[in-house]
């Protein structure tokens, strides 16, 4: 198979967003699949003094930047990561100017497909689809919405899931809750004993950039509800405040969550790790969790990298019924609950933590889905798609 030179237009580390991490993982795995890959980095906040070796150009404010367009047209094919908020202009409309100037086959990856777009958002997405040689979405739900809401023919859309590091089958599964309140005799009021006690509890994990809409407050309420049912669990919330939220509001949201934990009398069970985790430590935390909680408030989220990571890690999952969760967890790999319903979350968590066999069954069902999400498999599909488009372009040129 011949060497393929692929360009990726996207935000990129050190930018702290899901699309930047997605593009870095795709880059690394395409390299492993014998592709020559370069990054045209979309500026998302201040750029470091020096850029990474794989970054060949930077798109800042001018969508007609000659250096950017020259770099993109130097590849065999270009993969464009799309999200409304990362390109300039209203609703990121500057991306269409870039697409107009790319003379190579273009694959556009749509990370957001709104089911109720504004008129301008609809127009931008329709222009993007019209300019793309192929459109990729990350879920079947997104493909259906493109057809039903935007009228895009199904044949023009390819579903390639978000990638993840797939965990091996677990050596053990969670059976039932441990007798937490009376297991040890010493005084839990002492600070060092509180920390030791928390380490003995099962762990519920939420992670990602923290911002309003992530629903962490409902997770805190669910932990309080669990305590009221006689089941105690540590709730670990990993991730820093989203940079754009912190820029405008500081740490007000995180402070409100700490206050809420205190008011619900679960401050001893709720722990915040504000570091934006490197991949290895994050995967260690995921591996050590007993349940993953996705309490998101959005009712139109058609793709979630955190959800994919949780399934790939073969972890029991409790998630609100956003579209991507309904698609992936409907077969039993997790439990769906209504949005903003902490009581339902608490019941679902209690069942996983206390009923023998429930967690093991979810783990087994997640294991059936996980192989399709391996980054190596995902990168191979992008390589194949790019190759098909290049062959088509060569036939037309001939």
Image (spheres, rainbow, N blue to C red):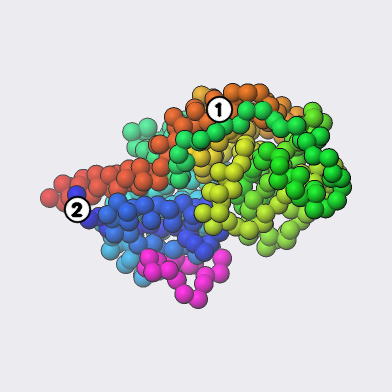
Quadrant hosting residue 322: top right
Is residue 6 placed above or below 174 in the rendered structure? below
Span of residues in magenta: 45-61
In what element is the residue under mark 2? loop
Quadrant hosting residue 41: bottom left
Q: Which residue is mark 1?
A: 360
Which residue appears at 75% of the width and 41% of the height? 220
Which residue appears at 63% of the width and 23% of the height? 356
Which residue appears at 73% of the width and 61% of the height? 250
Residue 235 place in picture, x, y as percent? 70, 43
Q: Which residue is mark 2?
A: 2
391 and 146: which is toward the camera: 391
**Residue 124: within the magenta?**
no
Decide if residue 321 is in sight here.
Answer: no
Main secondary-structure element of the magenta-colored stretch: loop
| Nearer mark to the viewer, of 2 and 1 | 1
């Amino acid at each position: 198979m011949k060497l393929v030179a692929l360009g990726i237009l996207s935000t990129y580390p050190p930018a702290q967003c899901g699309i930047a991490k997605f593009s870095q993982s795709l880059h690394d795995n395409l390299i492993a699949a014998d592709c020559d890959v370069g990054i045209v980095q979309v500026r998302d906040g201040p750029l470091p003094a020096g850029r990474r070796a794989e970054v060949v150009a930077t798109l800042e404010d001018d969508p007609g930047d000659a250096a950017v367009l020259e770099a993109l047209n130097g590849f065999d094919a270009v993969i464009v990561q799309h999200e409304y908020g990362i390109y300039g202009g209203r609703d990121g409309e500057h991306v269409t100017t870039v697409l107009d100037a790319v003379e190579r086959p273009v694959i556009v990856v749509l990370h957001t497909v709104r089911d109720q777009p504004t008129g301008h958002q609809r127009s931008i997405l329709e222009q993007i689809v019209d300019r793309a040689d192929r459109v990729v979405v990350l879920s079947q739900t997104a493909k259906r919405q493109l057809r039903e809401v935007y009228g895009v023919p199904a044949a023009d859309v390819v579903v390639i899931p978000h990638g993840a590091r797939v965990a091996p089958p677990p050596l053990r599964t969670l059976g039932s809750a441990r007798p937490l309140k009376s297991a040890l005799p010493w005084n839990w009021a002492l600070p060092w004993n509180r920390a030791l006690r928390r380490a003995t509890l099962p762990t519920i994990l939420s992670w990602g950039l923290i911002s309003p809409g992530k629903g962490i407050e409902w997770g805190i309420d669910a932990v309080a509800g669990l305590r009221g049912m006689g089941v105690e669990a540590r709730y670990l919330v990993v991730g820093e405040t989203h940079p754009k939220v912190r820029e405008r509001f500081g740490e007000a949201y995180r402070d409100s969550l700490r206050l809420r934990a205190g008011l619900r009398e679960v401050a001893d069970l709720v722990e915040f790790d504000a570091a934006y985790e490197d991949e290895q430590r994050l995967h260690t935390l995921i591996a050590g969790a007993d349940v993953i909680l996705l309490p998101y408030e959005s009712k139109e989220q058609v793709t979630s990298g955190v959800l994919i990571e949780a399934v790939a890690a073969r972890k029991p999952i409790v998630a609100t019924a956003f579209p991507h969760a309904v698609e992936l967890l409907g077969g039993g790999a997790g439990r769906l609950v209504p949005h903003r319903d902490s009581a339902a979350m608490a019941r679902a968590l209690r069942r996983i933590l206390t009923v023998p066999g429930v967690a093991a069954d979810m783990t087994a069902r997640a294991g059936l889905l996980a192989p399709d999400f391996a980054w190596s498999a995902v990168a191979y599909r992008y390589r194949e798609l790019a190759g098909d488009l290049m062959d088509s372009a060569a036939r037309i040129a001939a």
